[in-house]
Image: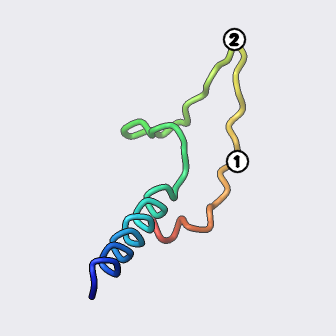
Amino acid sequence: MTRIDIGRLALVLCLSAAVLTACGRKGDLDLPGGAQPVVKTIDGKKVEQIEDKPFILDPLL
C-alpha cells in the first residue's frame, strides 16, 4: 500500500466514524428512576409530550 492508499483508508474510516456517532436522537436526559415524564413549561403553559416514534436505527444502538 502506498501513502495515498493509507491516507484514503484513514479518511474513509474517520468519516464513517463521524457519521455513525451522529446517529441517534436529541432529547432530554432521563431522570434516575424517572417513573414520571418531565413536563416542560413555556411562559407558564404546559407543553404536551410528543409521542415517541421508534427510529429506524434504534435496534443498532
Report the amino acid beneath label 2. Asp
Q: Nearer the viewer, residue 12 or 18?
A: 12
15 relative to 36 in the view: left or right:
left
21 relative to 47 in the view: left or right:
left
Secondary element at tag 1: loop
Secondary element at tag 2: loop
Q: Nearer the viewer, mark 2 or mark 1?
A: 2
Q: By what rule are the colours in the image chosen?
A: rainbow
Residue positioned 34% across, 77% down in the render: 4
Name the N-terminal-most of marks 2 and 1: 2
> Where residue 5 appears, x then y in whole percent?
34, 81
In the rendered view, tell whether residue 57 sits above or below residue 26. Answer: below
> Where residue 44 appears, x then y in whole percent?
68, 11
Q: Which mark is residue 18?
A: none
Task: State which quadrant residue 47 falls in.
Answer: top right
Residue positioned 45% across, 40% down in the render: 30
The residue carrying pointer 1 sits among few (fewer than 14), some (14 to 19) or many (20 or more) residues within 10 Å by Cα, namely few
Q: Quadrant of the C terminus?
A: bottom left
15 relative to 56 in the view: left or right:
left
Q: Quadrant of the N terminus?
A: bottom left
In the rendered view, tell whether residue 18 sits above or below residue 25. Answer: below
Report the amino acid beneath label 1. Glu
Residue positioned 69% across, 11% down in the render: 43
Q: Which mark is residue 43?
A: 2
In the picture of the structure, the residue carrying the numbered disc 1 is 51
In the rendered view, tell whether residue 18 sits above or below residue 36. Answer: below
Task: State which quadrant residue 2 falls in.
Answer: bottom left
